[in-house]
Image: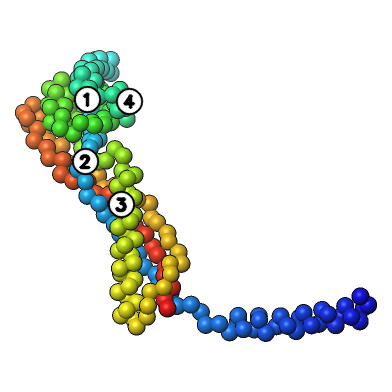
Amino acid sequence: MTLKRQTAFLALLIFTALPVNMASADEAPKRTISLAATGAIRTTPDKVDISTGVTAQAPTAKEALAKNSEAMTQVVAALKAEGLDPKDIQTTNFTVQPLYEERKDGRSPNIVGYQVTNSVQVTVRDVGKLGQILDKVVTLGANDVNSIEFGVAEPEALKDEARKLAMRNAIANAKLYAEAAGAKLGKVLTISEDQGIVFARSVAPAPMEMAAKAVPIEAGTTTVEARVSVTFELD
């Protein structure tokens, strides 16, 4: 092809492409609607997480440690005797700290003893045994029960149900808004999900002076929730 013919051919390509580009630039932007929706599934808890432990005081650190270790050994043995798997018993805190005498004359405080604290996080997978487990560990020396949280051991299937419900809610809400605006709901353009949440229900521990009695605890329900943000096209 000669130079003249090549130049004419390129000019023709540029000329024919221009109307297409100009037409796309003149297109009206798509109308869309974006909103967020939530799906929540309630279920009966099948596990309980407990934070418990022993705090012991004595004139010397050695005595406080020995006192604490004796009680904590009995507590852990009792948990295992109730059928808890060792992997569900985990030490979360161990501290040794001095105890000081308060002085009001401005002098430096004296150390009058030591305190040893040993805490464990325990997962109970038989919710019905929670009351008797608390009775036993407190009787054997556990004097710290910091939290009790009911939850779900395997929430993935429930999360999927919550996701479906969240999406159904998003579509229903989007249709409502579209109809109110005199439009029709079109196809889904984007979907994004916030991290699924399992709301564990916490229970305040019973006072330690009541712990030797029967501990009445109700598991209630736990909520598994999913949140989605969806953008729809409007027709």
Residue 87 disc label: 4
Report, in whole angstroms, how far the alpha carbon at label 3 lies from the one at label 4. Answer: 30 Å
Q: Quadrant of the C terminus?
A: bottom left
For marks 1 and 4, the one nearer the N-term is: 1
Residue at 34% x, 50% y is: 160
Residue 12 position in % (x across, y down): 79, 82
Report, in whole angstroms, how far the alpha carbon at label 4 lies from the one at label 2. Answer: 20 Å
Relative horizontal placement of residue 25, taking residue 164 as reference (left or right): right
Residue at 66% x, 81% y is: 20
Report, in whole angstroms, how far the alpha carbon at label 3 lies from the one at label 1. Answer: 41 Å
Task: Specify few, some or many for label 2: CA neighbours under 10 Å numbering under 14, 14-19, or 20 or more.
Answer: many
Q: Disc 3 designates what residue?
A: 161
Question: Tag 3: residue type?
Answer: Glu
Residue 146 disc label: none
Residue at 25% x, 15% y is: 66
For marks 2 and 3, the one nearer the N-term is: 2
Residue 194 position in % (x across, y down): 38, 55
Residue 54 disc label: 1
Looking at the rendered structure, the secondary structure element under dot 2 is loop
For marks 1 and 2, the one nearer the N-term is: 2
Question: Tag 1: residue type?
Answer: Val
Above-or-below relation of 160 to 28: above
Residue at 51% x, 79% y is: 29
Disc number lying in front (1 or 2):
2
For marks 4 and 2, the one nearer the N-term is: 2
Disc number lying in front (4 or 2):
2
Question: Tag 4: residue type?
Answer: Lys
